[in-house]
Image (spheres, rainbow, N blue to C red):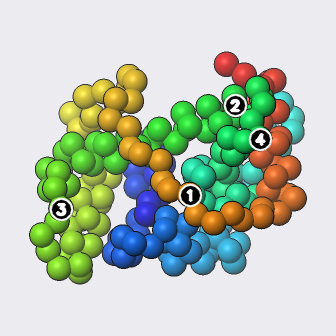
Amino acid sequence: MALVSAKKEFIMIDVGTNGRVSDGGVLFYTKFWEMYQQNTLKLPEPSALPNTRQTFPYVFISDEAFELGPNLMKPYAQNVLNENRHIFNYRLSRARSVVECAFGILNSKFGIFQKDLPFEPDTASLIVATCCYLHNYLRKNANSYSFSNENGNNINRLEDLQRTHNRNPNCEAKAIRENFCSYFCNEGRI
């Protein structure tokens, strides 16, 4: 489980949860989720997006496997899409591609990820964490450290995470997502 910045750097990783645990379940056991639930992440105050005076909270972008929250955006379900929601899902997917690209770079630059890691769990966790740390270091300090298709179309896309059980997000989270949806279809359209 990882959080990735817009610069394709890993800002939080959690390694070592059993692979049989759902993606939403993995998140539930992270220190990040504990801090998110306790509202102790020290997120910036909401601010206005370009071309609007309406303030929007800073959000983490996820996929359908995760819970919608005031600071955690996920796409609309396929069965409730209209044109505006489709646009929102597309824009969210484009933002999520940064995460996919970070993992693609990590995978392409560190050949150890080309196959199953033949190590004990503690050693494998240390290797993964070390590679993520080196990835971040090289992103900041080595001009030649990039993915050959990093600025083009995303050829090596990761598969979407699997769905978990339905969750009922609160009204505030739904309203925030609707506000982003409206923004992307009006002032923030491209």
User: Height in image: 96 above or below 22?
Assistant: above
User: Height in image: 49 above or below 36?
Assistant: above
The amino acid marked with disc number 4 is: Val
Which residue, as the protein is rendered here, is positioned at the far top? Answer: 190
Circle 4: element type = helix
Q: Quadrant of residue 168?
A: bottom right
For image coordinates 68% across by 40% down, the residue present is 78
Of labels 4 and 1, earlier in sequence is: 4
141, 185: nearer the viewer: 185
User: Height in image: 3 above or below 124?
Assistant: above
The amino acid marked with disc number 2 is: His
Circle 1: element type = loop
Contact between marks 2 and 3 (CB within 8 A): the answer is: no
Q: Position of residue 52 (x, y in %)?
A: 83, 30
Residue count near mark 1 (Cα–Cα under 10 Å), binned few <14, some 14–19, many ≥20: few
Which residue is tagged 4?
80
Contact between marks 4 and 3 (CB within 8 A): the answer is: no
Mark 4 or mark 3, which is nearer to you?
Answer: 4
Along the horizontal axis of the image, is 157 left or right of 182? left
Which residue is tagged 1?
163
The tag on residue 116 is 3
Which residue is tagged 2?
86
Q: Position of residue 153 (x, y in %)?
A: 40, 24
Mark 2 or mark 4, which is nearer to you?
Answer: 4
Q: Position of residue 172 (x, y in %)?
A: 85, 58
Of labels 4 and 3, earlier in sequence is: 4
The amino acid marked with disc number 1 is: Arg
| Tally of numbered tags | 4
- Disc 2 versus disc 3: distance between alpha carbons? 36 Å
Please indicate, yes or no, whether residue 73 appears anywhere in the rendered image: yes
